[in-house]
Image (spheres, helix red, strand yellow):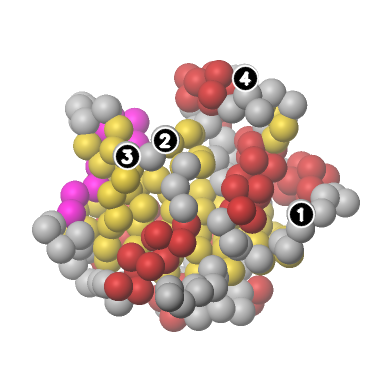
Amino acid sequence: MNKKVQIPDCVILAGGLGTRLSSIVPNCQKVVANINGRTFLDRLLNKLQKDGVQKIVLALGYRFEDVIKSINNKTIENLTIINSIEKIPLGTGGAIKNAIPFIETDEVVVVNGDSIIDYPLIKLLRFHHKNKAIISMLICHVEDVGRFGSVVTNKKNQIISFQEKKLGSSGPGYINSGIYIMSKTLISELPSYPHSLEKIILPHLCGKGFYGLKTNAKFIDIGTPEDFKRASKVLIE
């Protein structure tokens, strides 16, 4: 009989400026943009609740009032939602560090608020435990890595190269899906000053307990106008 695994507390990064999306979603925090009658954040919250997450910390910054208004009086069964509001822009890494007072579990699920992937979170957690990883990332296959940047692993699923998007890169490969499981200890060691998890922290963790779980699951992102329009055609429920 498989031992039941408890899903750790979750931090959703929902404080980005969303400048690339401002042309079609003006005057709004992008995570609460309306897609066919529901906000993107609402869809993400429900997906995580179905995955077994019981506590979510929303890492908020830019237009945090939009998010608070959106979830005000919202009740999702067996899910506690807490707001962590940054006073100045902290970047993704700083936002995670800022949320640590609200985290009660030894491990933490970290999720980008502007993307969603159809993959069971429990599988990533078991992969994380199997490899005794410090941090694990769900990486998904796409036909063109140009807009996302690429992730390369070795035969042991250790991440050996993590590159942010750059001009001229294209073609099929694996990308960061925006879902991580990391130790609370690692988060406590992150700098308190503004910094990017993807640009400053992750590249230096390659070969140091950093693992990637590959999947071909459907990945949806709303970071650009083109992707937002694509998401509107897919997210119809």
| Cα–Cα span, label 2 and label 4 | 24 Å
Judge from the rendering whether residue 143 lies leftward or rightward of residue 33; answer left or right: left
Task: Please indicate, yes or no, whether residue 108 appears anywhere in the rendered image.
Answer: yes
Task: Please indicate, yes or no, whether residue 93 appears anywhere in the rendered image.
Answer: no
Q: Eyeballing the image, is 129 above or below 145?
A: below
- Earlier along the polypeptide chain: callout 2 or callout 4? 4
What residue does disc 3 label? 216
Q: Position of residue 4 (x, y in %)?
A: 50, 74
Q: Quadrant of the C terminus?
A: top right
Judge from the rendering whether residue 234 lies leftward or rightward of residue 102; answer left or right: left
- Earlier along the polypeptide chain: callout 1 or callout 3? 1
Q: Are marks 2 and 4 in contact (CB under 8 Å)?
A: no
- Earlier along the polypeptide chain: callout 4 or callout 1? 4
| Cα–Cα span, label 3 and label 2 | 7 Å
Name the amino acid, label 1: Ile
What residue does disc 1 label? 76
Q: Secondary structure at mark 2?
A: loop
- Earlier along the polypeptide chain: callout 1 or callout 2? 1
| Cα–Cα span, label 1 and label 2 | 24 Å
Judge from the rendering whether residue 157 lies leftward or rightward of residue 188; answer left or right: left
Q: At 42% from the left edge and 35% from the top edge, which residue is drawn?
A: 218
Residue range corresponding to the magenta coloring: 145-153
